[in-house]
Amino acid sequence: MRIAQVAPLFEMVPPSAYGGTERIIATLCDHLVARGHDVTLFAAAGSATAATLVESRACGLREDPAPRVSPIAAHLAMLDQVRAQQAEFDVIHCHLSHFQHFPLFEGFAAKTLTTPHGRLDYADLPAALARWPDMAMNSISLNQRQPLSQANWVANIYHGLPRDLYRPLSGRPAAGIAPYLAFIGRFSRDKRADRAIAIAKAAGLPLKLAAKIDDDDRAWFHREIEPQIDGNCVDYVGEISEAEKPAFLGNAAALLFPIDWPEPFGLVVIEAMAHGTPVIAWRNGAMAEIVDDGVSGFVVDTLEQAIAAVPLTLALDRGEVRKCFERRFDAARMVDDYVAAYAVLGRQTEPVNAVF
Amino acid sequence: MRIAQVAPLFEMVPPSAYGGTERIIATLCDHLVARGHDVTLFAAAGSATAATLVESRACGLREDPAPRVSPIAAHLAMLDQVRAQQAEFDVIHCHLSHFQHFPLFEGFAAKTLTTPHGRLDYADLPAALARWPDMAMNSISLNQRQPLSQANWVANIYHGLPRDLYRPLSGRPAAGIAPYLAFIGRFSRDKRADRAIAIAKAAGLPLKLAAKIDDDDRAWFHREIEPQIDGNCVDYVGEISEAEKPAFLGNAAALLFPIDWPEPFGLVVIEAMAHGTPVIAWRNGAMAEIVDDGVSGFVVDTLEQAIAAVPLTLALDRGEVRKCFERRFDAARMVDDYVAAYAVLGRQTEPVNAVF
């Protein structure tokens, strides 16, 4: 198949640091090419891909040294470029969340698939969707669909990681390393590092926090988290690199993911699972779909449940956690699913713009 | 003429508080209706207009209590609504700055006019414009065009205010009020209240600051401005309402506008002039176009020039300042210009989307 992948322009594909969307697009492109598809990636220059790269912007919007950038205008130019080349593609898969591509793609909607990667509970999305109700959409979890259940959902495809990107450590966890719980993310209210600290203290296990401090979150961090960091029971290891992730996640007794927002997927959860590390997650967003309760971890509703889950989680078979990952979150499965979704496209014949 | 006005959805038209764009659109609509045109305004609900209002959103994006709004999706829905009704209009005048309407309006581009109200030096605007190079554009100053000189500029129309919205005070300035210099705006680095203070101190006149303190500007305000406020030579009167403006501007000996950014128009400058109050403005953005040097004020390049201009400005004839306003910045003149621009539209026959 001749497939166009249309990426957001905020980061390169894959991103230099944080950016789950761009990492998934990179994996998808490389796997599709390996399977013999003719793939064109519309993305920021600097992207590294096995696909043919159309450099739609000189660099990612977030890394641009220019004093002023316009995400709207940047995506507009890229989307019109895709439209100009659309006859070259059998499928056009767009990864933008706020539907800016709908008016540009409506002329070839039947071969367009949209995967929004973010939360969908924005006040304005239903009204915009109502103008193009038949655009084929793919969710990254069933929970993600809830605020927009009326959309034309043609698939639900969970993210996947290359099978061998992360492996359980041979010692699992390494001999000589005292058991610890892990937290990874940003120090934002949504991620609830405070809950992770409360769980670890109550469970009597040390906690290692690997997290970024954004400017917006600094005040909250100083007030709620910093006073509890003692370098012993609660240790802040800074922001970790991709190279440090295997040791951090692979040696952890469990990952704590006590989120307080409707996370539509949560890539770090399957990263932990790829290392054989089980997860204790709050019942928010997609967590109940991603974590196999009692196998790859536990999904909890309260602090008490989370604390009670710690010894149970430590007793889980890490080999079974890894097997869960391999069965459900291998990139090969994700790519199978996308190829199947692409094959379903084009069966609709109605125009996709409902003028009313 | 059957005219559609398409407003940004951030504020109501006119806005409840700050918002020059929405104030100008409100004035334009009301005057066009008064002249017998059939005007439809696409804007947020709550807008107050003599035109037929199409409520394109339940409220302005900035006043929405919803935890998450999407400006992209909100404008997308409105723009598609305009497109669905386009046959009802002879002219469609859009006031969005970042070209999101171009793909939706390309099918009837010949009757579309775009007035961007903001600065245009965003890194992504040239690439987006290059996809629709023939879209008819109107600037609010010649200086505004500079970063996008390649656009299809069909008009340059300075803003105007209803002639009798503000009047010189009868005492001009009122007897018994000691002469003072005025500053009005936000306490941002761009607006340079620090320069206003330096000018006033050197000139030996008290300064009254009427300004908003945005969260982003608070640190700068506390460091640079607050220590210099003494309630006497430098007095901070808070954020003033529309009702307080006439006394504040009308009693001032002069308005200081020492900006450090490419302000494309600067509505407060003509508000001062409407009161007969002259302006000392930095040579940035449109200032050299708005201020008639030596008549309605002075345009300066340095602090020394600004200080030297104070006694000259105080000696200006306030009646002549008012006449400048009446001649150049009366809303009736602005509306004349827009009606003339609308009449020029439609002469182009080439498609406006250049596919390359």
Image (tube, coloured by chain):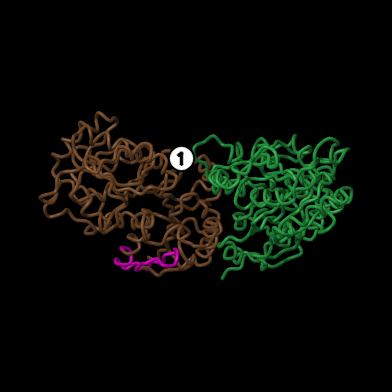
Chain colours: A brown, B green
Magenta span: A31-50
Question: Residue drawn at (79%, 45%), measured in percent from left and top?
Answer: B38
Question: Relative to residue A67, is residue B314 depicted above or below?
Answer: above
Picture quadrant of residue B306: bottom right
Compared across the picture, whether A125 is left or right of A176 comes to right
Question: Relative to residue A44, is residue B238 depicted above or below?
Answer: above
Residue A151, horizontal then vertical, whole percent: 46, 44
The 10 Å Cα crowd at callout 1, few under 14, some 14 to 19, many 20 or more, is some
Residue B101, horizontal then vertical, whole percent: 62, 54
Q: Quadrant of the C terminus of chain A?
A: top right
Amino acid type shown at disc 1 = Asp
Q: Quadrant of the N terminus of chain A?
A: bottom left
Compare residues A164 and A233 and report the one nearer the observer: A233
Compare residues A194 and A95 and report the one nearer the observer: A194
Per the image, is A117 magenta? no
Q: Is residue B351 visible?
A: no
- Please name the residue that numbered disc 1 is placed on: A121
Compared across the picture, whether A186 is left or right of B62 comes to left
Per the image, is A34 magenta? yes
Question: Residue drawn at (25%, 54%), measured in percent from left and top?
Answer: A245
Residue B127, horizontal then vertical, whole percent: 57, 65
Callout 1: chain: A
Q: Is residue A99 visible?
A: yes
Q: How many marks?
A: 1
Compared across the picture, whether B214 is left or right of B305 comes to left
Residue B279, horizontal then vertical, whole percent: 77, 51
Q: Secondary structure at mark 1?
A: loop
Picture quadrant of residue A104: bottom right
Question: Residue drawn at (65%, 42%), measured in percent from left and top?
Answer: B211
